[in-house]
Image (tube, helix red, strand yellow):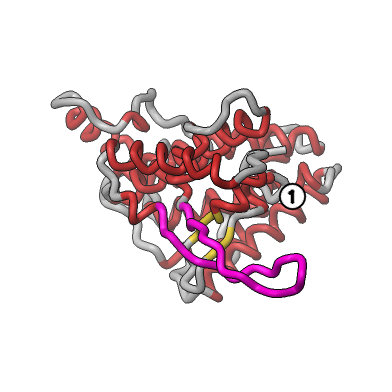
């Protein structure tokens, strides 16, 4: 069970406001954390609010006091106080809860992972186009390796077979273009690789193709070269159709960047040499994996 699936008890009680903002009810969280008396949980909330303020955040942005109408035993309703907690607030609450409880330990892991993911998303949102290209290229290199491993297990063995398999995905995503066709259209030299000459948007489309093709073949336990090729082609077409439904630009119509990934890497290394920077690019040259 992964920590971010609906099977997580903490994800199961996550709610959303009408405008789509996520929150957790303090009362529901208290019950999940096995606090029989909500007044005892109130002390945990107080500590979490103080920690929030001490960290430089406004508690009112993460702890929203509300009043809810609940039905009591006689069928009548009464108003009870509750607090809508942000994900960060939940993280602070969990850190101040009773650590002897097993569910608290699980919650500490869950909210620590989820909070870091949210921070990471914020970091990515602040990246330049060049940095997004480098990051996406590394992600695609890793997922292409996973796709190759899964395809090999399905029966795609020889280099020729793998080339056909890769083109099955490219052709449906790129309106009939193979990797060679893409290479020629971009005007690349023989030793240049198409993935190193894609913008962040084009890399993102191919990243989606690679991850979903690998997942489909593995999930459906697909066996045989033809079946694997068909699965990859299906995923490529689905990604293309999704781009069309969203009103996006088809990958073959996206511009080829003037600088390659290697050019950007050299510039990024010079930039990092001038002082501490984000650590996501601290790695060797991007592997070639057309």
> Does the rendering let one see residue 195?
no
**Compared with residue 76, is residue 235 higher up or lower down, i.e. above or below?**
above
Label 1 secondary element: helix
Residue at x 77%, y 42% (from the top left corner): 218
Disc 1: CA contacts within 10 A as few (<14), some (14-19) or many (>=20)? some
Q: Considering the whole magenta stretch, tell me its main secondary structure.
A: strand
Q: Which residues are magenta?
A: 63-85
Residue 64 among those drawn in magenta? yes
Task: Find residue 163 and report its image quarter.
Answer: top right
Task: Find residue 49 and report its image quarter.
Answer: top left
State the residue position of label 1: 216
Residue at x 80%, y 44% (from the top left corner): 225
Q: Looking at the picture, how far across and down is residue 69, in whole percent? A: 59, 71
Q: Is residue 262 left or right of residue 240?
A: left
Q: Looking at the picture, how far across and down is residue 288, in whole percent? A: 47, 33
Residue at x 75%, y 34% (from the top left corner): 152
Q: Nearer the viewer, residue 14 or 94?
A: 94
Q: Nearer the viewer, residue 254 or 16?
A: 16
């Amino acid at each position: 069970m992964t920590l971010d699936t609906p099977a997580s008890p903490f994800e199961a009680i996550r709610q959303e406001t009408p405008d789509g903002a996520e929150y957790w009810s303090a009362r529901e969280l208290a019950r999940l954390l096995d606090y029989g008396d909500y007044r005892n949980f109130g002390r945990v909330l107080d500590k979490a609010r103080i920690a929030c303020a001490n960290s430089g955040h406004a508690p009112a942005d993460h702890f929203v006091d509300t009043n809810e109408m609940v039905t009591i035993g006689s069928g009548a309703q009464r108003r009870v106080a509750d607090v809508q907690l942000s994900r960060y607030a939940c993280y602070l609450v969990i850190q101040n809860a009773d650590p002897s409880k097993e569910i608290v330990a699980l919650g500490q892991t869950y909210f620590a992972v989820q909070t870091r993911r949210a921070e990471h998303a914020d970091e990515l949102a602040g990246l330049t186009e060049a940095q997004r290209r480098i990051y996406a290229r590394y992600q695609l290199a890793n997922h292409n390796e996973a796709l190759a491993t899964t395809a090999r297990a399905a029966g795609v063995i020889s280099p020729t077979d793998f080339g056909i398999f890769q083109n099955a995905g490219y052709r449906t995503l790129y309106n009939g273009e193979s990797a060679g066709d893409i290479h020629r259209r971009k005007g690349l030299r023989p030793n240049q690789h198409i993935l190193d000459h894609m913008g962040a948007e084009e890399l993102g489309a191919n990243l989606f193709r690679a991850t979903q093709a690998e997942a489909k073949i593995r999930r459906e336990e697909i066996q045989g070269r033809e079946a694997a090729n068909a699965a990859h082609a299906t995923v490529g077409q689905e990604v293309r159709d999704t781009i069309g439904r969203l009103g996006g630009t088809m990958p073959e119509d996206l511009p080829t960047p003037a600088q390659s990934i290697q050019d950007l890497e050299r510039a990024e290394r010079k930039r990092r040499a001038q002082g501490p920077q984000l650590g996501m690019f601290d790695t060797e040259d991007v592997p070639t994996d057309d």
